[in-house]
Image: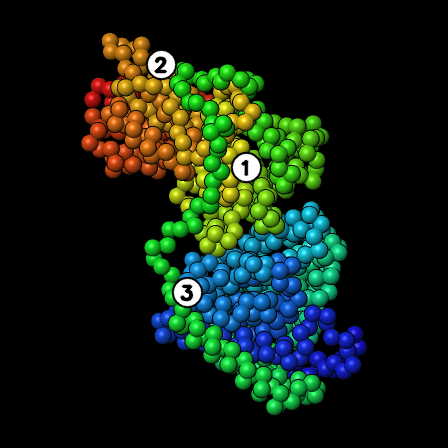
Amino acid sequence: MPQAKASGNGRTRTEMKLPARYPGHAQAYRLMFLGRLIDDEAPNFLRKAMGWSYHAPNAGHDAIQLALGCTFRPGKDFFFPYYRDLTSCLAGGISAREIILNGLSRDEDVAGGGRHMSNHFAKISLGIQNVSSCVSNHIQHAAGLGRAVKYYKSDAVVYCSFGESSSSEGYVFEGLNGISKEKLPVVTVMQDNGYGISVPKEDQSGNECLADNFAGLKDTRIWKVDGRDTLACFAAMEEAAAFAAAHKGCAIVYAFCARIGSHSNSDNHILYRDEKELAEARAKDPLPLFRRWLISEGHLSEADLEALEKDARREFDEARAYGEAAPLPDPGTAAEFAYPKAYQPQAAEIQPETVTGPVYNWQSGELLTLRLGINAALKREFRDNPDTFLWGQDIANKEKEGIFLVSKGMQPEFGKARVFNAPIAENFIVGTANGFSRFNRKIRVVVEGAEFADYFWPAMDQYVECGHEYYRTRGQFTPNVIMRLASGGFIGGGLYHSQTIEGSLANIPGVRIVYPSFADDAYGLMRTAMKSDGPTIFMEPKALYNAPSTRTKVPENLHVPFGKARLRRDGHDVAVITYGNTTHMALKAAEAAAVTGGRNVSVAVLDLRSLIPLDEEAILELVRKCGRVVVAHEGPEFGGFGGEVAALIAKKAFEYLDAPVERVGAKLTPVPFSTILEKAILPQPDDILSAITRVANY
């Protein structure tokens, strides 16, 4: 590229070769101008109470966004925009009408029919993804999708865009580290306008260019570009796309932009910016700079530009009129798309569930423990579906195959491309699973969300993402991800090794939660989860992994439906409703109650095994039969999942109760390391027996 002199658009270029994906001067200017028309009108919609209640103006980012949107190939590449990427999305193929429908949260909004915030543009049919408001966490999804693109040998490129300040989030390092290590075809675009809302970037980083914080990552290349300079932005994007597509390393385009307006309609930049700074920002506005450059270089005349502007205003006026008249969402549909479709086992896949005592034994199948049941299910589904994958920490390294050996034999049979270790980065583990599953609907990803459930917290925003995706896209996408968590105590593990966290997860919608306590249920639920659409949390009581009491014979074709509890022991005096570790305790307590004291108490034990969805019918039927109820679980009694079960009973079966509902759970105390102290905190069989006795004698 020849040397150039400074000009109003950054540089003068004579006789230069235009970037291949540059749409031509007329179309480039028209797109930029149309984007500005929409951007300027958005606050007016809010003032008219028509919508666009969240608007983050993109004025000052126009050049890099135009280049980004035009470099992206609709229907081939994938693009994760952020909430300021209006012109990127417009140039990428979302029409002005669709942009306005999103801003006004109309039913026809292609992003999700008003289910997500305004200014969150998406069109999944083009490859433009519906992303979160949790800034920059979509870099994990981009990395995961890049991994799938590479695995399936596609020539697509994944683009991920966000503001420079959100690169302070730890998961940005996790994402870029993974892109660098695996040389994934991902281009990360950081748009630097100097502020994170009102926080200047010098309060966020010691580097003026925040991309320099990641320069030490192997094979990372950073393109630093003047965000005023339209052609320079195109050139950088084109080079970065070629670099990423060739799997050369981590590509970062860093554009210095101008923030002309406030961060958003809820921010007032006058409170922290003086008039001199604002004047300097306006002087860097890419739109008039580009316009003047086109005229000065003789590319387009004033008349040409006026004709383009007139045509853009016509399109904008038509789009605005259509958007204003478009119907609002129907409130009757508000709860739709909360959960995707679950696999419904066929009759031949479901075994008759007749009570035979504390342990079920089927007539056929190998005798397995809980751990072996999970392992067998994984292997069977991996054999049946070649689009299955497993990753996490300590999944497989030579002779070590999972810290609890649940994944034993997986990598030797299915190879390192499908079963592999992940960094110690829970957000990256879950986020990349979300992204990977976007490549095609057949994919199922199983992850160890954390080696112990206690360590899952760094992935919580990704857990929320998994729950939101199907809803906010109005069914256009759901992450087909199974998150395995080794849960609970009774192993002397102490803090961060002994908690069970289903109570904290259950009130976040969109994710199914199962909690098996016997081998056959573990096997059947895993197979159902891996055939279902959507995310599932698979809680595994690690104290039971190898417990003899979990052994059952497991038919090879067994599938256990979601939302179906299992009567482990029949009875008519007291019902114990439970799951996980306390299922086995409840069976012991029920047996003791039947032979203890002057009165023999007949105790039924219902194993929920599926928490979300919950088998309300089985619970209420047993309450009506027994009239006296104990709800037992391992997690803290206060705020625990058992409170939901008790509330359900109080609401729908109160007239059948002959005694208050008793609850048994852990004390509201961290689980201590000493086994003596642990026993005093976690529920024990005697605690359940005492509760049975109290309700029986009420």
Res 680 → quadrant? top left
Q: Would residue 240 be visible to someone looking at this image?
A: yes
| Residue located beneath label 1 in the image | 530
Res 500 → quadrant? top left
The residue at 20%/25% (across/down) is 658
- Asked if residue 69 is positioned above or below residue 387 in the image, the reply reads below
| Residue located beneath label 3 in the image | 106
Residue 582 or residue 457, whichever sits in front: 582
Q: Position of residue 333 (x, y in %)?
A: 37, 54
- Distance from disc 2 to disc 3, alpha carbons, whole Å, reads 59 Å
Under mark 1, the amino acid is: Met
- Distance from disc 1 to disc 3, alpha carbons, whole Å, reads 35 Å
Q: Secondary structure at mark 3?
A: loop
| 182 sits to left or right of 66 | right
Pair 2/3: label in front? 3
Q: Secondary structure at mark 2?
A: helix
- Distance from disc 2 to disc 1, alpha carbons, whole Å, reads 35 Å
Q: Secondary structure at mark 1?
A: helix
Residue 591: which disc?
A: 2
Counting residues from the N terminus, which is met first, the one under dot 1 or under dot 3? 3
Q: Would residue 250 be visible to someone looking at this image?
A: no
Under mark 2, the amino acid is: Glu
Residue 229 or residue 241, whichever sits in front: 241
